[in-house]
Image: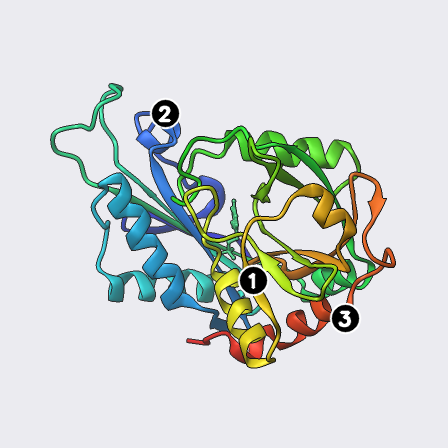
Amino acid sequence: MSRIAYVNGRYVRHAEAGISIDDRAANFGDGVYEVCEIRGGALIDEAQHLARLARSLGALRIAAPVGAAALRLILREVAARNRVRNGIVYLQVSRGVARRDHGFPAAVEPGLIVTAKSIDPRLGEANAARGVKVITLPDERWAHPDIKSLQLLPNVLAKQAAREAGAYEAWLIDADGFVTEGASTNAWIVAEDGALVTRHADRAILRGVTRTTLIEVAAREGARFEERAFSVPEALRAREAFLSSTTTIAMPIVAIDGQPIGEGKPGPVTLALRRRFHEMAARS
Ligand code: PLP
């Protein structure tokens, strides 16, 4: 079965799908994106993803390419045409196609691409059973990681550095020595005193949808939760550390920069949050 993509109003074979060489997404990274989990055929926390998409578009003054109802239909159609029951649906909005010039084009139609792919849930479970390693690197991104823009070069370089170091993720460190987030995930610890901690959602991080739902799970479980920055030394002393995203849910971290966290194995708080996540997340 060949994969199908949605590109600017048409469903096309993935292998033959293409965009213009003047697409501003390709020339400038001038666009935004979202990734939504599909689980058992349902979209997970779709409303939160679409709300964040609207916010990202507004921040960059890009018009919505289609209305919200049409977009929901397209996401489902792409998932169905690719027979994805467990996996992700990816959507990307570009400011549009125009002769290359940095300033906004006068009249331009925003572009929309949607793809979907299956991911075997057993892969994530195997990683979670073992736990993953992270390295730390200076956060060299622009001043607005809170916007889910296509400009991901520092994230790409950080992720590659992690891979080359045999790690799963890179935690990015701000100028004051505090962890902002990972290259494509939010960062968490269970501190020495047992409090669950993740950075406040300032301009320095993406407000992860998974992060938001995990905060709700923690509240329901009666966990003590602190939304504040934490440093690498505090993380190294923590009982547990983990990362979160749409594709990883809550993923235990067993080592930071080669130093074991807690007992050097996945921690109970992380694994409980991971197990409970889908009870709290919205399905549609
Ligand atoms: N932080 C960054 C930089 C990301 O790219 C992502 C996801 O792609 C996240 C955090 C996690 O966000 P979400 O939970 O919405 O997937």
- Where on the picture, by quarter, is residue 271? bottom right
SS category of the residue bearing label 2? helix
What residue type is disc 3 on?
Answer: Pro
Which residue matches tag 3? 268
Measuring 55% from the left and 30% from the top, which residue is drawn there?
175
Characterize the local packing of mark 1: few (<14), some (14-19) or many (20 or more) Cα atoms within 10 angstroms: some
Lower sequence index among marks 3 and 1: 1
Lower sequence index among marks 3 and 2: 2
SS category of the residue bearing label 3? helix
What residue type is disc 2 on?
Answer: Asn
Report the number of discs: 3
- The alpha-carbon separation of the residues under discs 2 and 1 comes to 40 Å
Q: Is residue 90 visible?
A: no
Q: Which label is found at residue 27?
A: 2
Dividing the image into 4 quarters, which one contains the N terminus? bottom right
Question: Residue 200 versus residue 282: which sits nearer the camera?
Answer: 200
Residue 26 relative to residue 136: left or right: left
Question: Residue 103 versus residue 8: which sits nearer the camera?
Answer: 103
> Residue 196 at what x, y percent from top left?
63, 64
> Residue 20 at what x, y percent from top left?
32, 30
